[in-house]
Structure formats: structure tokens, C-alpha cells
């Protein structure tokens, strides 16, 4: 062993060695902040998505949200909870009356990466001169993920992507992951990464997803019926009933969350939850209820359920739920273990007695 190593420990890795040791494929999400843009005319969002995927990264979500701080925060929280290790926003970083992305992002950040904004404005100055000072581009960590807020212009996005983000993205994501709170480390983090590597995207359900979601919901009901036919409902036309119900629920986004897990354009899982009021019969205060979770059997150990449950909890909390409750069949021990890993605790035990039972 060289003398300096014996005296001072292992030599520190260089920046280049850190880059080589980082996972080159990072799960990323793109969020466009705009009151007017659509996916059809969102040039900056499209440039980000294309540039990231061309570099080998995995795009797990791409959305457009209005320039409202609460909506921007909600989407970032959901993207990180859904497995994105890097979230890049575009738009709303200026000083106009409706520009509020900086306030939304800065309020979430746990560790500011001040050098990003400084370098971006220096590079912008070389291109556009003093107007660069009006950009409030910012970056930092949030719950083990990296969040970057960029301006809305295509030139600004291209500049930041090519000169700052792509050269360091795997390294930045690796360092950001070390800042995750204990509840996001260990098994659940590995599960979320497994789902991303399997090409799973967790997103809001659309009307075109209702047939698939209803089919999975019917499987969930039949699963419970097989566990205890005397306890669980045996209803006709399960798929048609669920499809109609979900169609109505999608019209209430202020209270209802319906998520799907998608792999290669196929829906392989879903989760359904909503805000519920106080129920004195059940001794329940107002809460968020996670009513349904189902993942196709072949993907049960790929982390899909972890991502669905975590994103559901994040969405319900953002909608105002002070807590999230669920019911699980007592025989379903695998589900119990998952929910407990994700922070749920046991609170009630349901018991059933048939009319003809003795004793």
C-alpha cells in the first residue's frame, strides 16, 4: 500500500471516475409549465424529451401543467414519487406576473445547486447579453431526486441540456440519491428502479385506458372472491360496472386519483384512490383512501406496486388528505409486507361471523 494511502485512507475519486461509476441510464421526467401549450406545440418539452432519450436515459413521464405553484409542486412531487430521479421543468422562470415556477421549485428544494444557475446565466450571457439576468433557472435536490427548472425558450433548453445537464446527469443523479430520507432508501428505492428498468411508466389514467383498468379491477374482485367467497361481493358484469364507475370518477380530479402502470403501450397495473370525508360509523376522520391496487402477476416483483402506491399517496396528500388508509385481505401477506415497507401501520382487524356459525 502506498504510504499516502496508509496515512490518509483511500485516495479520493476524481470527477471523471465518479462519472464512470454512475449508472448511465437515468429515469427522467419532463414537466412543461404553461397556460397555453399542448403536447402538439411544446417545442421545448419535445426537445428535452428527445435529447434525454437520445442520450440513453429513460423518460418515465412527460406532462404539461398550468403556471400555478401548487400544480407545479404537485406534479414534481408525483414524478419523484413515481420513480423519476431527475425532473426537468421548462417555462415560468422569468419575472412576468404569471411566472411562478421558481417559487414552486425553490420551495421544494432541500439542497440548492447554486452553481447550476450561475453557470447557466453565464452561458446565456454569451448568447443573449444582459437579458440573461432575467432568468431564474434553478436546480437542487428533493427527496433523493434532482429537480431542474429551465426557461421556456427552445434556445435556453438546448443550451442547458447540451452544455450542463447531459455531461453530468448520471453523476448528479447519483449524488442526489444520497440525500434521500431514510423512508425512500433501501428496498423501495430498488423496487422503483427495477420498475423503471422494466420500462414501466406510471401516469394518470385517460378515458382511453378505462377498458384496461376495468379489466384489471375485475381481476382484483375475483382474486378476493377466491380468498373468501362468503365475505367478498360477487357481482355480475364486473368490467362494465367498473368502466362506468371509473368514467364518472375521472370527472372529479379534485377528489379522485386513478393511475395506470404502462409497459410498451400495455396497461399492466392500476391504482384507484380518493378523498373521503369523516365516517362516524367507522370511526374515521377525513382521509385519503387507497381503494384498489392491482399489478399483473408477471410483474409482481418488478417494483410496479411500489411506484403505484407511492405516487397515489403523494397525490392524495397533495389533494389535502392528512393520512391515507387502505383495507387488505388478511390472507394477502405479501401485500401486507409491501404496505408496511411503504410506511403503513396496522390499525383495525375486521372479523366476520356467518349466520349459521356455532358458538
Image (cartoon, rainbow, N blue to C red):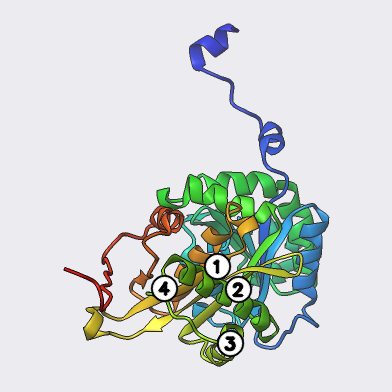
Secondary structure of the residue carrying numbered label 2 = helix
Q: Kindly report which numbered mark, 3 or 4, lies closer to the viewer in this rendering.
A: 3
Marks 1 and 2 close (CB-CB < 8 Å):
yes
- Nearer the observer, 219 or 29: 219
Numbered mark located on residue 237 in the image? 3
- Mark 1 or 2 closer to N-term? 2
Q: CA distance from mark 3 to mark 1?
A: 19 Å
Mark 1 lies on residue: 294
- Specify the quadrant that holds the C terminus: bottom left
In 3D space, how far apart are the residues under numbered discs 3 and 2 (Cα atoms)? Answer: 13 Å
Q: Give the label, 2 or 4, closer to the camera.
A: 2
The residue carrying mark 2 is 216
Numbered circle sitting on residue 317 = 4
SS assignment at label 3? loop
Residue 140 location, x and y as percent?
Answer: 55, 56
Q: Relative to 38, does residue 297 appear above or below in the rendering? A: above
Marks 4 and 1: which is nearer the front? Answer: 1
Q: Label 1 vs label 2: CA separation? A: 7 Å
Horizontal side of residue 47 vs 15, given as left or right: right
Amino acid at each position: 500500500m502506498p504510504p499516502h494511502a496508509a496515512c490518509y485512507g483511500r485516495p479520493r475519486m476524481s470527477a471523471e471516475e465518479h462519472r464512470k461509476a454512475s449508472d448511465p441510464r437515468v429515469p427522467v421526467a419532463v414537466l412543461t409549465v404553461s397556460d397555453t401549450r399542448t403536447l402538439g406545440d411544446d417545442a421545448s418539452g419535445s426537445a428535452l424529451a428527445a435529447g434525454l432519450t437520445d442520450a440513453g436515459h429513460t423518460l418515465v413521464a412527460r406532462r404539461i401543467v398550468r403556471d400555478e405553484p401548487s400544480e407545479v409542486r404537485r406534479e414534481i412531487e408525483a414524478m419523484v414519487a413515481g420513480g423519476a430521479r431527475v425532473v426537468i421543468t421548462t417555462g415560468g422562470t422569468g419575472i412576468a406576473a404569471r411566472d411562478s415556477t421558481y417559487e414552486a421549485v425553490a420551495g421544494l428544494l432541500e439542497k440548492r445547486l447554486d452553481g447550476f444557475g450561475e453557470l447557466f446565466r453565464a452561458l446565456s450571457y454569451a448568447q443573449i447579453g444582459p437579458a440573461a439576468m432575467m432568468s431564474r433557472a434553478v436546480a437542487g435536490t428533493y427527496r433523493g431526486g434532482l429537480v431542474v427548472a429551465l426557461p421556456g425558450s427552445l434556445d435556453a433548453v438546448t443550451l442547458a441540456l447540451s452544455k450542463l445537464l447531459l455531461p453530468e446527469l448520471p453523476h448528479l443523479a447519483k449524488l442526489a440519491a444520497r440525500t434521500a430520507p431514510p423512508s425512500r432508501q433501501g428496498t423501495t428505492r430498488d423496487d422503483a428502479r427495477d420498475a423503471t428498468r422494466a420500462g414501466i411508466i406510471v401516469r394518470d389514467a385517460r378515458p382511453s385506458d378505462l377498458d384496461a383498468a376495468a379489466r384489471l379491477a375485475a381481476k382484483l374482485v375475483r382474486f378476493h372472491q377466491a380468498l373468501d367467497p362468503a365475505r367478498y361481493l360477487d357481482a355480475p358484469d364486473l368490467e362494465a360496472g367498473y368502466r362506468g364507475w371509473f368514467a364518472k370518477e375521472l370527472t372529479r380530479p379534485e377528489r379522485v386519483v386513478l393511475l395506470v402502470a404502462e409497459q410498451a403501450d400495455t396497461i399492466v397495473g392500476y391504482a384507484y384512490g380518493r378523498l373521503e370525508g369523516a365516517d362516524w360509523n367507522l370511526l374515521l376522520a377525513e382521509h385519503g383512501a387507497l381503494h384498489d391496487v392491482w399489478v399483473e402477476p408477471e410483474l409482481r416483483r418488478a417494483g410496479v406496486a411500489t411506484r403505484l402506491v407511492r405516487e397515489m399517496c403523494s397525490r392524495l396528500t397533495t389533494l389535502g388528505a392528512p393520512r391515507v388508509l387502505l383495507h387488505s385481505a388478511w390472507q394477502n401477506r405479501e401485500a401486507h409486507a409491501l404496505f408496511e415497507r411503504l410506511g403503513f401501520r396496522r390499525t383495525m382487524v375486521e372479523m366476520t361471523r356467518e349466520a349459521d356459525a356455532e358458538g
